[in-house]
Image: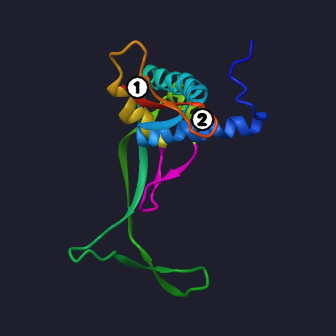
Amino acid sequence: MALQRKLGRATDQRKAILKGLVSSLFEYGRIETTLARAKEVQKISEKLISIAIKEADSIDSKKVKISAAKIDAKGQKILKAATSVNKKEYRVVDREVKTELKTVDSASKLHARKQIMNWVYKVKDKDGNPINLANKILDEIAPKYKERKGGYTRIYKLGQRRGDAAEIVILEFV
């Protein structure tokens, strides 16, 4: 038994269609497509949300050293004099090293992030700024459905398309 419907396309075309539809669903929250495509996108998106829910709390903390330039009262970088090997003097930015506690993904959450990124395209908002859909799924969508045991999306049937009588539906998040 096949994992996905064939959708009358070659494998590369089918995967591209499904990745585009999955990306649009996570970007806009709803898509309008045919019933067969919607059922496939629904399977994929629900698996991705389930993966994100499992890894929602997998965060580790790590101490990281950060080197930052010292700044005076006017907001200018503080420079100090230094001498080169050739006995020439030059000025360098005075830096201070700080250690901060940063949150980083655990190994399992990193794996989940890579699985999600395998099914979504890189998208941009209307201003041209990139949107990281993997972060959106892990940080916004997964916490919203944390208490649900499945059924994160629903399909509304709209009727038949005029040209080829294909069943048109709206797929959206619950």
Please give left or right for residue 7 compared with residue 94 in the image.
right
State whether the magenta stretch is mostly helix, strand or loop.
loop
Residue farthest toward the left in the current orientation of the protein:
73
Please give left or right for residue 2 compared with residue 97 in the image.
right
Q: Which residue carries the number 1 mark? A: 56
Between 134 and 160, the one nearer to me in the picture: 160
- Hey, what amino acid is under mark 1? Ala
**What is the x, y in percent for residue 117?**
57, 37
Q: Which stretch did the figure color magenta?
A: 121-132
Quarter residue 156 falls in: top left
Q: Which mark is residue 47?
A: none
Instruction: Estimate the spatial distance between the alpha carbons at disc 2 and disc 1, rounded to whole Å.
Output: 18 Å
Between 3 and 109, the one nearer to me in the picture: 3
> In which quadrant of the rendered image does the N terminus lie?
top right
> In which quadrant of the rendered image does the C terminus lie?
top left
- Hey, what amino acid is under mark 2? Trp
Which SS class for mark 2? loop
Q: Which residue carries the number 2 mark? A: 119
